[in-house]
Image (cartoon, coloured by chain):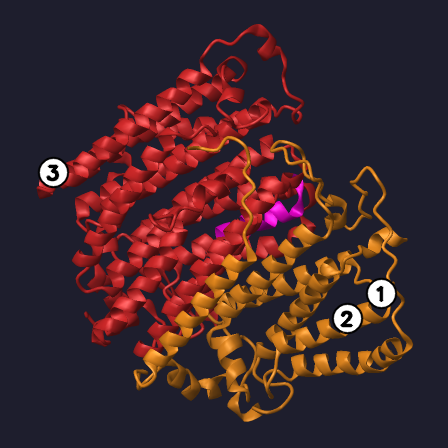
Amino acid sequence: MDQILLQSPLLTPTPIWLIALPLLVAFLSPLWGRARWPLLFGVHLGLFALALWLLAGVQDGPLIETLVIAPPLGIHLHADAVSLLLVALLTFAVALVAAFLWQGARAPHWQSRQAFVLIMLLSAGCNGMLLTGDLFNLYVFIEIAGVSAYLLSALRRDAAALEAGLKYLIIGAVSAVFILFATVLTYITTGTLNLAAIGMAFADIPAAMQILIGLLLLVGLGIKAELFPFNVWVPEIYRGSDPEASALFSGVVVKAFLFVLFNLVFLILADPAVVGRWLMILGGVTMVIAELTALRQRDLRRMLAYSSLGQVGLITLALGFAETTVVAGGLFHLVNHTLAKLLLFMVAALMLSRASSGHLDALTGIARRLPLAAGLFVLGSLSMLGLPPLAGFMSKLWIMAGFAEAGVFWPIALILLGALLEAAYFFRWIALFYRPVPAPRLASDPVGLPTASSAVTWPLLVLAVLLIGFGLAPVLLEPALNLAAEVLLDRSGAIEAVMGVRP
Amino acid sequence: MSRAAPHPVRISARLMLVVCGWLFLLQVAVILLTLGQTATETVGDGLLARTMETGAANAVTAVVVSFRGFDTLGEVTVLFLAATGIGLLFSARPERTGTNTGPGSLDEGLAEGNPPVPTMAAPPPERVLSQPNEILANGIRLIYPVLLLFGVYVVVHGHLSPGGGFQGGVIIATAFMLRMLADPSFVLPPIVIAVLESFSGSGFVLFGLIGLVLAGTFLGNVLPHSAASTGLLVSAGVIPLIYILVGIKVGAEVGAIFQDMLEHHPHQEH
């Protein structure tokens, strides 16, 4: 007992804290009173630091944390270089949104205890999805993240928000049914729920059953990861929800689902080439269709939603190639997209608090009233479409260089086409923000909420600095991303760490 | 082309029926297809062989609360979210403004335990509920204490006999629901619900963290749980304690869900 106490997990924190701490703080929510937003920010900053600290310890191999009994019988957490990198990214993103809401959200629905609980549990659910090594446990965390997201989109409780919440609930429930079917079938045919054990047993089950399970997972996760043709619901929900909530959906939830999808593909399939090819095609189609549709949007939030779909398609295109350089580029773009979309959605929140609606006409000339916000929007959109020296340029360059090295050129053409379309619609919106407007229209400031303090802009400035910093010095992230890509693709290493034998 | 105004999209009941029917048929087809394809050796068998270690006579409880207790913590969290959501959406009527920037009406006071401020300009319409009839009122008066006691029994004996925190908690909540039917003035005070929810949920996580510190794994069983005491009321270490917390949480939350879904809001009657 003494020996156990000496190496107490309180002194050497384990990955379970990344899930247990947000759960504990959320359950204790009635205690916090007015300290909720600082607490949400502080907890996530702490989790971010913990994830980075753990990340430094998994450079040589994954950290397997047993829960109650050892895998493959029990549930375990699988913390490796890629899952911890994403946990760090997502907790950082939630911390910034929390800071923004703390300083900026004056609307009563964001001041409620429920909003705090929902964001905290959304983050716990996403961390659980990234870290768990068990298929059913994954389903439980998908439900936690999902239910929090449905409620966040309905939080404002007017007609638009309730419609968005209801639609999200229905489509999310359908997706969950597909994932549950796949889980049940996997357990029936392989007799195990541990992801590594499934990875070893999956090749032995009948081919027809493999295809069925794969399709069920593709539909279920494709809905949640917003891939074509399962993503028609996305713009409606982003339009009805508050931009702060959409920032969390686009920047956090979707990224967690993308990781789950690709982690399953690379872990379970001995040869991911065929499935990867199909995912690349899905990603390419998602990107082109979304960017084309974004051209026609006249509502800021819908435009951002379609742009988000386009970037998700690009990330899928890169990750599906299953080759280290391109996957590292894809993960880099995933990081950049989270940062840039958080920036754009938070700027949209600022603009919507000063304009009568998110419509094109209502936002004309808004740069006069919100010069800093409009400037940050320009920066975010330039990074999104990939202009040097911003981070989005570097990640697109990595991806295209990787494709060129491998001698595959059609994705490069698609990515350039996508960037062209992005330039077209982002410049249209930017031109509109800076268009001079007649004085009377400026004077009619709509009856909005009390204006937020200027402190609200510091989370935005942090994001802007990071976008410039990663663009100028991608070497800051390069070792971590390369290692993450190798670990994501290293199927036998991941299985060996859990099962003790190489597949 | 893109639509500028919010368009009146309704989710039609017929479409939902088709989707649900399709999913149901898919499930039936899948189950029929997999008959005879089951794996010979499953993790379930492996876990069953090791339930003796937990000291719990009920093997299902041993798996649910100990071996896969982390899943159970997640499921309790999903229920907590569902109760939070129903409280959010049903407890007070939103303003039907339809604008995007207008502040929603949210009973922040309710969450803090203060009486909620009516948010509508007009006083809420008085809903005169018909008084429950004599048979209902007296019947429930008889059955209410018995049902509560039965619920507590099922929770406390979860590690010995079929049942446990979820089942017993729902029985307790059913007792509350019957009381609400029989007695319109019966109210589960929101502050008590909030305290019970917090206490039981955080207690579950704290048991997990105590297990992490003392037994080396999250939710590890830190109290004595020898196989010799299997079958006694005090056995299986922390398993009955965690299940009692689950029972409290389920009882409080399902009870609160019933209350939120009642059409009249009990607080506006005083």
What residue lies at 44% left-to-right and 64% top-to-bottom?
Answer: A177
- Report the side of B188 relative to B206 (left or right): right
Q: What amino acid type should be assigned to the residue bearing mark 2?
A: Phe
Residue A94 visible in image: no
- Residue beneath disc 2: B176
Q: What amino acid type should be assigned to the residue bearing mark 1?
A: Phe
Q: Same subunit under labels 1 and 2? A: yes
* Vertical position of residue A55 compared to residue A442: above or below: below
Disc 3 crowd, CA 10 A, few/some/many (<14, 14-19, 20+) = some
Q: Disc 2 versus disc 3: distance between alpha carbons?
A: 67 Å
The answer for which chain carries disc 3 is A
Chain letter for orange?
B
Which of the two labelled residues, at mark 1 and mark 2, occupies the earlier sequence position? 2
Residue B264: image location, x then y, percent: 80, 56
- Residue beneath disc 1: B186
- Residue beneath disc 3: A404
Chain letter for red?
A
* Vertical position of residue A131 compared to residue A183: above or below: above
Residue A380: image location, x then y, percent: 39, 27
Q: Disc 1 versus disc 2: distance between alpha carbons?
A: 9 Å
Q: Disc 3 versus disc 1: distance between alpha carbons?
A: 72 Å
Q: What amino acid type should be assigned to the residue bearing mark 3?
A: Ala
